[in-house]
Image: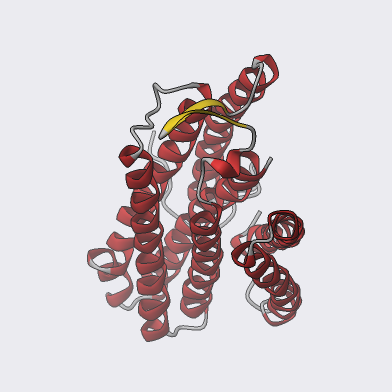
Amino acid sequence: MSLRTVHIVFIVFATMLSFLLGLWALMRGIADASGLMIGIGLIALISGIILVFYGVTFRRKIKHLA
Amino acid sequence: MQIPYEVKARPDTGVNNAKLGIWLFLASEVMLFGGLFAAYVFLRIGADAWPGMMMYGEETMAERADQILNVPLAFVNTMILIASSVTMVMAWASLKMDRFDRYKLYMGLTILLALGFLVVKGFEYGDKFDHHWYASTNNFLGVYFVLTGLHAIHVTGGILVNAYFWGPGTKMWKRGTARDKAHFTNRIEVAGLYWHFVDLVWIFLFPTIYLI
């Protein structure tokens, strides 16, 4: 398995973590009325969306570097 | 018997020797971390309360890990490691495109991000020590310090390897022959595989210890 493939696998797991953490932090922030946790939740969800776009772009652009 | 030093994939294994070596090493690392994760699962299943009793001014019952651990700092560290995996793969891609200046930039950024991870981890540990919370305090903190400490050692190892390839190790590339350049690029790919493994361990470690 090449670094290219491993990186795509890593980005998939990082994306899943971002969405998981985003939901967890939002729920915790709402339950505890914590602005910090709500902020972390929103940043994590946005990071997840950015990672999806990054992963797709990386896969398309890196094809010729096998 | 001499092991041939080349970057072509061997017909019997399907990969070159360096890649076979790093995958065997990473398999042993999976067993190391896997054993510790298994220990964590069994300790947690057998515990009456998790994290359990903690001294926080006075002795109080901690019902959730995030009451003890600093999730915002761990979140920052997660972002740092994700960014470092991106810069690591960019360093490798730069060599593939024969852009050595870009390689130096991205590899330098990878090293700085990894150092940043350790600094943040240092603040996190410092906070625990200020509360007199150590690995010997209870099973929860034992698991926390062993797993995150072992991971931090692996990050340190990655920094040392990457720093070598950023500095003295670049002599191989600078010799300028196509063979040397191919060998150096292969070395960076192998270092990148190790770095991604270290980052992936954190991706599993973070939710397991801090969130669940």
Front residue of B92/B118: it is: B118
* Relative to B101, B15 lies left or right: right
Residue A2's quadrant in the figure?
bottom right
Q: Residue furthest left?
A: B168
Which residue ends up furthest to the front in the rendered image?
B58
The residue closer to the viewer here, B154 or B17, is B154
Residue B68 coordinates in the image, percent (x, y):
52, 40
Residue B190's place in the image compared with B44, above or below, is: below
Q: Residue at x 74, y 54 (%)?
A: A31
Q: Is residue B105 above or below residue B14?
A: below
Q: Percent position (x, y) of residue A43?
A: 65, 72
Q: Nearer the viewer, residue A48 or A11?
A: A48
The N terminus of chain B: image quadrant: top left
The correct choice, above or below, for A35 with respect to B2 in the image is below
Residue at x 51%, y 83% (from the top left corner): B97
Q: Nearer the viewer, residue B19 or B63?
A: B63
Relative to B179, residue B12 above or below: above
The x, y position of residue B98, in whole percent, is: 45, 83
Q: How is the image coloured?
A: secondary structure
Q: Quadrant of residue A14?
A: bottom right
Residue at image point 77% right, 59% down: A23
